Amino acid sequence: MTHDLTRWSAARLADALGRREISAVEVTQAHLDRTAAVDGAVHSYLHVDTRGALEQAKAVDDARTSGAELHVMAGVPVAVKDVVATQGLPTTCGSRILAGWVPPYDATLVSKLRAAGMPILGKTNMDEFAMGSSTEHSAFGPSRNPWDLDRIPGGSGGGSSSVLASFQAPLAVGTDTGGSIRQPAAVTGTVGTKPTYGGVSRYGLVALASSLDQAGPCGRTVLDTAMLHAVIGGYDPRDSTSIHAPVPAVVRAAQSADVTGLRVGVVRQLTGEGYQPGVQARFDEAVALLVDAGAEVVEVDCPNFAYALAAYYLILPSEASSNLARFDAMRYGLRVLPEGIDDPSAEQVMAATREAGFGAEVKRRIILGTYALSSGYYDAYYGQAQKVRRLIADDFTRAFEAADVLVSPTAPTTAFRIGEKLDDPMAMYLNDVATIPANLAGIPGMSLPSGLADEDGLPTGFQILAPATHDDRLYAVGSALERQLVSRWGGRLLERIPELVPAGGSDDQHAGATMGMAR
Amino acid sequence: MPSLSRDDVAHLAMLARIELTDAELDRMLGELSVILDAVAVVQQAPTEGIEPMSHPLPLVNVTRPDEVRPGLTAAQALSGAPEADQQRFSVPRILTDD
Amino acid sequence: MTDLTAQQDVQAGDEVGSTIESAPQAVMSWQETVAAYDPVLGLEVHVELGTATKMFCGCPTAFGAEPNSQVCPVCLGLPGSLPVVNEIGVESAIRIGLALNCTIAPWCRFARKNYFYPDMPKNFQTSQYDEPIAFDGWLDVDLDDGTVYRVLIERAHMEEDTGKSLHVGGATGRIHGAEFSLVDYNRAGIPLIEIVTKPMTGAGERAPEIARAYVTAVRDLLRALGVSDVKMEQGSLRCDANVSLRQRTKKPEAQADVAFGTRTETKNVNSLRSVERAVRYEMTRHAAILAAGGSILQETRHWHEDTGVTTSGREKSDAEDYRYFPEPDLVPIAPTVQLVERLRTTLPEPPAARRRRLQATWGFSDLEMRDVLNAGAVELIEATVAAGGTPAGARKWWSGEIARRANVEGRELADMGVTPLDVAGLDGLVQEGRLNDSMARQVLDGVLAGEGDPRAVADARGLALVSDDGALAAAVDLVLAANPQLVDKIRAGKVQAAGALIGQVMKAMTGQADAAKVRALILDRVAQ
Ligand SMILES: [Zn+2]
């Protein structure tokens, strides 16, 4: 399998590119070919930029040939979630209202990818405006979990998780407002980090909830994820909430994998009841492995986490209702004229466009947020949620006095079936119960694979949380655990994923691949 | 907890400029009521004397110097416009007047 | 849910306030109005700051640029864009607050004011809500009769301007009847400071005058601060006037106990004169409605400069719910004591104190000073004196001849094409006896026509009083010889008869003589 470049880690690709053993065009083409073969079945991408990716790859190869000093990641391709503005490449956020919109500017993190010479393969699918935990709320159809195509790849960043698990890209950029990087990573056996709030510029990220949103790296290994983190992270004067400090030494931490004497806190409120037995079992084993690696384990209490989900589902819709007001058919995006009105006013066109252009979940959250902010209810809902937010941050502060990192299962369950929770918004929301507190407090979190659940053979995720700006700790702990697990498994978890078998010569992309052999 | 009426949802939809269908209104009313019941738990939290937290990081005074930076050309600005005319965004008639 | 259900249910698309009143509204006479009612005013002044860039992005703010040529992802509200606060915008707000004797908030935030409008790119305005940067101030306003009215300032806060719509297809070019609108976002995001007064009571029949005097005082203050070009006609200074009436009490001391009436907010008041007229009009309109037993609708009204009336704008119903919340894309502003104190040292002398000082220095009478103020000539006179002109000469030119011409042409004094240096030069030529008044006016014509500085114009046009006494004496002798009857009359004591002789001499000298000198010469010869 080593000849198949799509199976290589980003670190290995970077190394081989640097040694000129392989070319960037070769690497990029291999991934584009893989996409042509399997994405009809997985549907990770909303847009594939074949030409742009190959142009960037060729530019890197040419520069390398001419002896130019290149970024260590130059030529390593990457997929970008469709919520991130890319100049000249459609950016839809999985919404009909933005179908066909091509931004006239790049997000800061995209500028950084381009500056590093990383070819952008395409834009990955997502729940509409990042509202969801399954990609079923994408206006352009769900992505599928490469472990079982009948199941969800997580959300909202299911495109970015499935693109990695189906070997269509070695790296992907995601965004995490309440778990949209970590939960998809958990259910697809991949790695994803939500950096400290302000660690990666939000400039060019189409905002869902401004005070919660954070872009971050997704990869198949902890080191790969760290390497992408180092590229996209750092201060940006265009983002007022950006941290004015260098990116923590995440790559060095991933390489060191040193947890000797580190205090690992198990959050009592984020284990046990409500967690699928297989998820809990893999979590308990992983904690034991960390002890084997030299860490100490303590139990910590975060009593106010009981209110986290409720606070989150007030703060997020409130900010979203305001952030999404700009989609009004006046300056960009969809314009729908109301039926049966001869000479519609701007207001009527706005209302008709937003009715036609937004999906049910988006409308639901906009209305909820409008309510939470409306006069007479602000204090009881939005104001109260902001106080709860402080309580949760205070819980973390206390917990981090007793522990250097906190751990929990990333999601309560493994991947559920497509359609299973679509009609029950609250059940869908519960997926994020373990990931949400980190967004409310602004602290960094990572999910990495902890194994397969016994009952369904699907991946389970292990979440690590660290104090704000100490993102490097995630990588030290994640890397240490990863080494223990890989040696125990005798290989990486993703080596056990079923093959996606391209259907012979079919032109129909959506029927283009079927499940191959069972595990 | 006060319960939400269908008129309330219609009013909220008007504020949010979404022309919901009758069927959507009915459905939204049911769903919102369930969600509101669930999120009302924030009111039970021990928040007396607690300052609201609107920002994850305690930053203040982030400003930029008053210096011109390159922006977009008019063509770029108008590139996504559903309709443009005379280098301006063309929008349907505007009702209210300030 | 009582709050929500009680709100007026305005569906999207209802033509709220779109009806225009075609018939003129009934108004009460001014005398009756002020006899029966006591007005309460509230004035909101919006000033566009003269910063180089917008409030939250690096786009330039120049007036009159090509449409949509001064925009970027931020001020266009493109998805993903983020605001960053203009440092000078904040400093200007603090300086304005200090000049208005306000307290500067040690910590404040921006807030989003959410409502949909096509000229507002994000469909929320980034503003300040319950945490303004400056609050609780006052401004003393000089009235025409020399009394001073103290206006209490509620707050001054930072916000951003909207884009500009061009309404196409309607008969009048106004909004009503327009088929579509064309939007230019160059103005969107330009920094605004909104200055809000506390309710102004006790003004009585002087309310319109006080309103005008207040806006004038704010304009002068902002100009002195150098934070804005304060041009009302270009919209860089805008005023909304809130007016309400309450029944006048028999005993004046009981007036304060009467609750305020329902107010209307009049917008589009684009000149100082309009401020006075609009307040006066609204008072008489309210009075007519109240006297007829009607009630005032709380609404926005539109001032029409041409017809001198207001018409109904948007109904300010409860359906408008701005859903303010702290702007999560910006962090709080916490001005340090050091910053505030440093900015305090940059404040100019308060305009009123400065006026008193200049009047004393220049030796102007109250009447002369008022003429100067009304002509808006204080700075120009100051500059002229600095350039070597005499205060009296500078005043004569700026608030006399140049002001007259500016008035005729409908232009600002400063835009007339004559500089303080020119006026100082002109005054110098008069003072040194080279020009008389009528010659000096001709020189001014030349300066205005771009012929050069006053001395060059005088030289080129050959304008100078004849200084050759011999030539003058000869001309006098000729005229005396030709008018023996007039000479006799003067000798008989009718000195005023000299006027006709002076005229003839001046004519003979083609105006290039000093009339006083001619007169002296004539009387001298006749007496011989
Ligand atoms: Zn701009």
Image: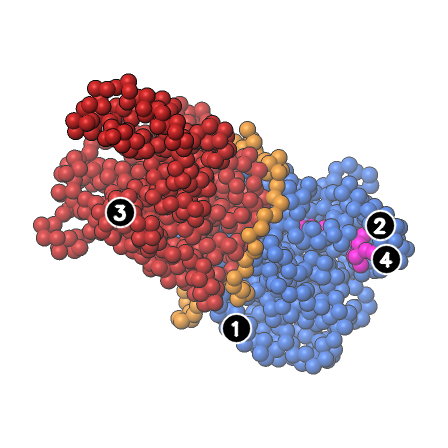
Chain colours: A blue, B orange, C red
Name the residue furthest top: C482
Q: Residue flagged by tag 4: what amino acid is it?
A: Gly
**Res A326 seen here:** no
Q: Is residue C92 left or right of residue C297?
A: right
The numbered mark at residue A429 is none
Q: Secondary structure at mark 1?
A: helix
Q: Which residue is mark 4?
A: A18
Q: Residue flagged by tag 3: what amino acid is it?
A: Ser
Q: Nearer the viewer, residue C319 or A180?
A: C319
CB atoms of marks 4 and 2 within 8 Å: no
Q: Secondary structure at mark 4?
A: helix
Q: Residue flagged by tag 1: what amino acid is it?
A: Asp
Q: Chain of mark 3?
A: C
How far apart are the alpha carbons under marks 4 and 1? 45 Å
Say if disc 2 is inside 8 Å of ligand 1. no
- Is residue B43 within the magenta segment? no
How far apart are the alpha carbons under marks 2 and 3? 80 Å
Q: Secondary structure at mark 3?
A: loop
Q: Between label 2 and label 3, give the one nearer the viewer.
A: 3
Residue ID at (61%, 77%): A403
Q: Are marks 1 and 3 on the same chain?
A: no
Q: Between label 1 and label 3, give the one nearer the viewer.
A: 3
Q: Which residue is mark 1?
A: A395
Q: Which residue is mark 2?
A: A63
Task: Give the main secondary structure, helix, strand or loop, of the magenta stretch.
Answer: loop
**Res C86 seen here:** yes
How far apart are the alpha carbons under marks 4 and 2? 12 Å
- Percent coordinates x, y for residue C364 in the rendering: 29, 47
Q: Which residue is mark 3?
A: C365
- Chain part drawn in magenta: A69-84
